[in-house]
Amino acid sequence: MRRDVQPTQSDARRGARGRPSRATLLADLCAAAWVIAIGGLVLLFDGQELSWLAGLVAGAAAATWVAVRRSPGTGWPRPAVPVPSQRQPDAAARQTDAAARQTAATIGVLEHSGWRFLHDVTGLNTTYDHVAIGPGGVILMQSMDPDGVVAMQSGEPVLECRSGTDAPPRLERLRPRALADAAAFRDAVQRLSGRRLWVQAVVVFWSEFPAGCVADGRCVFIHGPRLAEWMARRPHQLDPRDADAVYAAVNSLAQPGEHPLQLAV
């Protein structure tokens, strides 16, 4: 659809600033003519052709300068003024951070029973949300709080939107990623400690999860409020001395600076 475009007030002001006034232009031209006239007077009374030539060159240069100065689109380019970003933090990132804090608070009550925890552990290509080391072994956890209801279909979690929306269910494909992270973390611990241990992959949901807890042996999907109880009931796998050795190796991953895996390879 065609739309007539009218100049705005700001455009008009910019145009006014870009056009020279008649008085200013006349003054500049008079100055150039005056330089030429001086050269002519010197030639008339002194007979010095060199003075006339100098006045002519100076006047021409002045006229050229006036033309260049007053022509549109000339002059030094103005540096662009950076506009501060107004982008707000991503809602999904905020939900993930809140879910991680909930998980950390929930499992913290198990410290009195021999469990030790590390959060935001940096790997070579990723960051692990939570690592738990204790009597029940080594557990690698990922915290999530998707906006909707999480249901299980063919061993995979599917996010179903809440009632009132027409969005189709979305397959999260979390299981392959959780298993890959657990395998990579297991290899990292082995390189640093010389011990090969089973690392249990766990995905913790803080949104609605009617199934409560789904375990297939290799990966566990669990509702956040049930996490501490599930961990407390895990069969014994590590003695305190072994747990300390594994914790020391994993703790080196969480320290800033040069990554220890780059030294262990």
Image (tube, helix red, strand yellow):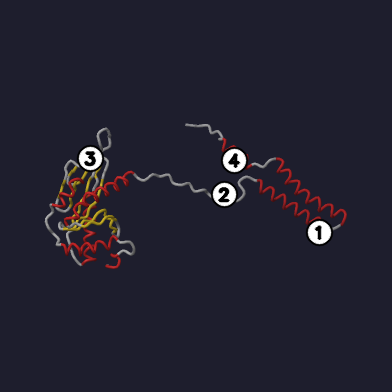
The residue under label 2 is 78
Q: Nearer the viewer, residue 163 or 223?
A: 223
Give coordinates of residue 247: x percent, y percent.
Answer: 22, 62
Which of the 4 image quadrants contains residue 255?
bottom left
> Disc 3 and disc 4: Cα gap in Å?
56 Å
Query: For the residue carrying disc 4, how many other residues have a C-alpha within 10 Å: few (<14), some (14-19), or many (20+)?
Result: few
Q: Which comes sooner in the sequence, label 3 or label 4?
A: 4
Element type where label 2 sits in the image: loop
Res 223 → quadrant: top left
207 lies left or right of 44: left
Residue in the picture at 27% in, 32% down: 164
- The numbered mark, 4 or 1, whose residue comes first in the sequence reads 4
Q: Are marks 3 and 4 in contact (CB under 8 Å)?
A: no
Crowding at dot 1, Cα within 10 Å, few <14 / some 14-19 / many 20+, comes out as: few
Tell me the residue at 25%/42% (across/down): 170
Nearer the observer: mark 1 or 2; the answer is 2
Mark pair 4, 2: CA separation:
14 Å
Residue reaching furthest front? 112
**Which label sits on residue 50?**
1
The secondary element bearing badge 4 is classed as: helix
Q: Amino acid at mark 1?
A: Leu
**Is the Cβ of the residue at disc 3 closer than 8 Å to that at disc 2?**
no
SS class, disc 1: helix
User: 14 left or right of 43?
Assistant: left
- Point out residue 245 in the picture as x, y percentages from the top left corner: 20, 65
Tell me if label 4 and label 1 are in contact, CB under 8 Å.
no
Q: Which residue is mark 4?
A: 14
Q: At label 3, which amino acid type do we have?
A: Val
> Which label's residue is closer to the chain start, 1 or 2?
1
